[in-house]
Amino acid sequence: MTNTHSSIPPALSAVILAAGEGSRMRSERPKPLHRLCGRPMLMYVLDSLAAVDARRAVIVVGHKGDWVTKKVQEHVHDIELEFVEQQVQRGTGDATLVGLVGIPEDEDDSDVLVMPGDAPLLRASTIAALVEHHRSTGAAATLLTAVMDDPTGYGRVVRGREGRVVRVTEHRDASPEELEIDEVNTSIYCFRRNLLAPALRRIEPDNDQGEYYLTDVIEVLASAGHPVEAMVAEDPAETQGINDRLQLAAAEAELRRRTNEALLRSGVTIVDPAAVHVDTTVRVGRDVTLFPGVMLQGSTVVGDRTKVGPNSRLVDTVVGSDCTIDQTTAREARIGDGCRVGPYAALGPGSEVPSNSTTGPFYTAEARR
């Protein structure tokens, strides 16, 4: 049993389930690689581990797994990554058992986060609170749950005496009384590893799909007398998964809202936040002003006191300080300090505007050969 009184917490790893096809996305691209604000959604799930001392993240891949592995490795991350393949998609329970292969056996006393690869709105503070709740209560498993105004379609969290979680009942299997429950499972958990693996081996594919459901582990543990806890997320919206393009667009809108809010708090003026799109990969200096219609994408950097817009799109472009960029399109370009660019300028890949230059209207530049 985990010693909850020890000053040294048990090791922590994460298993991220990213093997599904995501057929409702109607895309050749694997669902975990669909982009929001310039990055694959799977990278935001990894970001949510930033506030916990996770040793590694084991990513369970399946559908087009080589593509997922290659793309994730191209992005910067601060955690050791392991990739394991679920060769046949037989459900979340089977995927989790496959994921445990990526955690060394000598960490049998560790804690394991299990998370879906399609929850890009998760905040690091929420995952940290989940791990803290799990450890402080000495639970065998702790679910992150959410209270929904309309819980239709979600698995209901059934509690027993003293509020302990008894099981998770899928919507289609719920009784009329259980359908009245508004607390739902988010598919985000923290487990004691030495109890998780045996419980996974006890579940059966007793469902229409013939799949092994991770949710069944909750009833296995509770029935064996192990304490199962739940922590209710403060904001249900951040636990939402992405299943189609409509949900992808809604999640992107929320990430843009968070990004613009952070920029405003850091000393950037955004004249109309609803009309300015800034990727999470962009860096913007202080006292910058962004006018309506601005799009800053990729690895773009904007220096202090620069004014951008209206109606400018900069992609992978570096802009110096004290510039005015007016109705300009630039890709992989460099603009020095103190420049006035536009209106209607077009800067191609590799082009440069020297410091203290004025381009004038309808300026076009490509890289020098």
Image (spheres, rainbow, N blue to C red):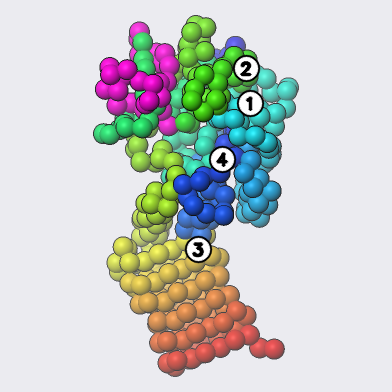
Q: Which segment is the magenta one?
A: 161-186
Residue identifier under label 1? 97
Earlier sequence position, callout 3 versus callout 2: 2
What is the distance, in whole Å, between disc 3 and disc 2 at their CAs?
Answer: 45 Å
Q: Amino acid at mark 2?
A: Arg
Q: Residues within 10 Å of mark 2 (few under 14, many from 20)?
A: few
Q: Quadrant of the N terminus?
A: top right
In the displayed image of the protein, which residue is found farthest to the front? Answer: 208
Q: Is residue 53 above or below residue 172?
A: below
Q: Is residue 180 above or below residue 280?
A: above
Residue identifier under label 4? 20
Please tell me which residue is depicted at 65% across the width and 51% down the height of the picture.
Answer: 67
What count of labels does the image hold?
A: 4
Residue 331 horizontal side relative to residue 74, left or right: left
Q: Which mark is residue 201?
A: 2
Q: Amino acid at mark 1?
A: Leu
Residue identifier under label 3? 282
What is the distance, in whole Å, between disc 1 and disc 4 at their CAs?
Answer: 15 Å
